[in-house]
Image (tube, coloured by chain):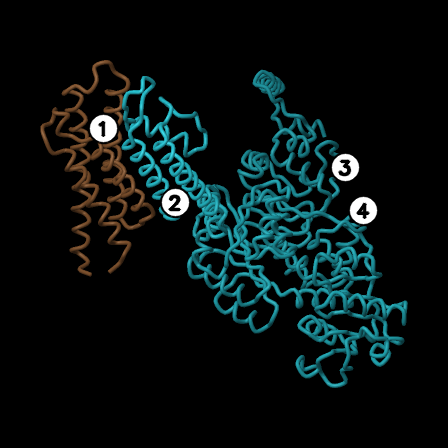
Amino acid sequence: MNLEKVFFAFFIVLALTLNFGFFLGDLDDPNHHNVYELYAALVVSLIATVMKFGDRAHIGAVLLATSLVADLQLIAAVVVWTLAVHASDAGLTPSTMASIVSLSAGALLANITSVVILVTETVMFRR
Amino acid sequence: MHNLLYLLLRRMRLPLIAVILAYAISMIGLVLIPGVDDQGNPWQMSFFHAFYFVSFMGSTIGFGEIPYPFTDPQRIWTTVGMYMTVIAWLYAIGSLFSVLQDPAFKRIVAFTKFTREVKALREPFYLICGLGDAGHLVIRELAAHNIRSVIIDRDDSKIQLLRLEDLPLVVPGISADVTNTSTLVASGLQKPECQGVVALTGSDHINMTVAITSKLLAPGLPVICRAESHDSQDNIASFGTDYIINPFDSFAKRFAMMFQSPSMYLVYEWMTSIHESPLTDFAKPPKGTWVLCGYGRFGKAVQESLSFKGIRTAIIEADIAKTEAPEGTIEGRGTEAITLYEAGIEQAVGLIAGTDDDANNLSIVMTALKLNKDLFIVARQNLSTNDTLFAAADIDIIMQSGRLIGQRVVDMITTPLLADFLRMARDQNEEWANVLVSRVVGVLDKPPESWVMTISQEHTPAILELLNRGCPTMLGDLLTDPRDITASLPCVALYIKHANNIEVLLPENETPLQDGDQLLFCGEADAETHMHWSARNLHALNYICSGYDLPSGSLWRWLETRKQRRKGADPDMARDMQE
């Protein structure tokens, strides 16, 4: 057992699960989407990205790319949320919530790709 | 480039995770801990405010407690967060600097820069391995001749020093192992612009490795190689290395030539050295018994050449068994008066200090001169840093292998015709050399420069134009001063190689020039400039050939033809009239 691989898989899967947890619920209902969950998803996603730094294999490069996509989507969601709460008079409207959740859905897709690649690689090597 | 980025990212993995975690923990704490607003109502910090606060706290900017003054539990948590984020930042920045300062990382940066410089080379260049005295001289002279070079040496400090030097061209250099094939390839071995490989390291084995690598990976490329022992010389020659330079043999042959044909020696010296001494100032070595100190590779080569010319040598050598010195060799270093006495220094006419230690050589020279001040002194100098010492000692001939090899390589690269000339000259007798020397001394008062001129559309358009018009051009026309056609330029034509490979030494002035001829001249540097002027400028050349200025503008040319037609005469007659 390789401790590095454990951490690596842990963060990738955790990023997916947190992301999925945030996404679950009605698209435009702020009560179904927890801000703490979004925060945790972003932090874990950032850590997962950094863990993929410096891998020169082709598969490592693809993992880094999907992870960067997830980061980008989540950061966009966070920025939209921040602007809605702190910089607009309307506050967190259902339409804003819908766009936040759909942005996180994009990140979810990227995270699923990451996990699929991870599983494929593991199966191929059978170690 | 990719290499660099990956290396940097891999090393920054842990520090970046530390920064992210420190931020995440500090932020979540600030969001969870309850606070009060300015009216005393309960208030909770949002993620946005927490991120804003942690950002200026972690970077030690510190705008204060924003937006409302903190409660004590918040302050306790901020104290923890402060230390956490600041330490994480320091750790990250420290790691970044240590990666950038890492010698391995710096080496990769230097190598990346070097390969980029080599890739960008679009002009012909030579690949030089080994930056010793010889390599240094070659690079400097090639740069002075506007020829590019790329240098590899194992010693990084030498490459750094080269970068500080004020060379007219950029010389890409890398400190790396030349025996590593990938280094040679990265240095442009297989680039079409590479003109040749020059192996000048101090080790015969490394030079051989370089030569064999180039012969295998770039078969058509000429290879010039330094070799100091006969074994490796044969080995290097066996796989088709184009030129092998053995400094000891070269010097010994040249030295022996001084005894037999001084004029020939002088011709060789003029043509092959870069020195500023007066034209005929060379001491003729006396015939008689010579004392030779040091029977190493240098001593052996000199002794062999001298005995071939029938000159007796008394040998002094410290380690007779190891060097297999001949019988009658005196054991000792030669630095003590007693061994020199034993070798008969008082009756000897000359002394050769040829050990591989400069201090010993100087000591031998000083001791010997004290015992017999009329000695003709030849000394071997091993390190170029001892230049001033050897110049201060009263030495007639200084042999410095680095300089000798460097000059040979420069000659081969800049004036390849010179080798052909010297090869033919070797078969001539002393009278021929006397004639040449007197001719050169007749027009010059300092050692001549040599240059090559090729008759072709590219190099001498004016000559070709005249030839195409059917006007024969002679060698003598080139030797005429274009500023004053009654005078000739201070130079001598040494050798001509016709397009059909017929070679002539010291060609006559009446030799007609043809397309494809290659000519070797020697003379003052100014003469080369004037000669190129007349070879390129049709009007100048025509004036030399005919003594008659061609009309250059269209109007004057038209008027000229009208005048000719009215006279019913052809331009040749006009020329005859002028003459």
Numbered mark located on residue B474 in the image: none
Rendered image quadrant of residue B395: bottom right
Badge 3 crowding class, 10 Å Cα cut-off, few under 14, some 14 to 19, many 20 or more, is few
User: Residue B164: horizontal and vertical position, in percent?
Assistant: 62, 44
Give the letter of the chain under mark 1: A
- Same chain under badges 1 and 4? The reply is no
User: Residue B139: horizontal and vertical position, in percent?
Assistant: 60, 49
Q: Which numbered disc, 4 or 3, marks the residue closer to the eye?
A: 4
Q: Amino acid at mark 3?
A: Ala
Nearest to N terminus: mark 2 or mark 3: 2
Q: Amino acid at mark 1?
A: Ala
Nearest to N terminus: mark 2 or mark 4: 2
What's the residue at 80%, 75% (across, down)?
A: B334
Work out which quarter of the rendered image holds the N terminus of chain B and state it.
top left
Q: Which numbered disc, 2 or 3, marks the residue closer to the eye?
A: 2
What's the residue at 32%, 45% (across, down)?
A: A53
Figure chain in brown? A
Work out which quarter of the rendered image holds the C terminus of chain B and state it.
top right
Measured along the vertical axis of the image, is residue B406 above or below residue B77? Answer: below
Q: Which residue is label 1 attached to?
A: A77
Q: Which residue is label 4 attached to?
A: B445
Measured along the vertical axis of the image, is residue B204 above or below residue B541? Answer: below
Nearest to N terminus: mark 4 or mark 3: 4
Rendered image quadrant of residue A87: top left
Q: Are marks 4 and 3 in contact (CB under 8 Å)?
A: no
Q: Secondary structure at mark 2?
A: helix
Give the letter of the chain under mark 4: B
* Mark pair 3, 1: CA separation: 90 Å
Q: Which residue is label 3 attached to?
A: B487
Q: Are marks 1 and 4 in contact (CB under 8 Å)?
A: no
* Mark pair 1, 4: CA separation: 87 Å
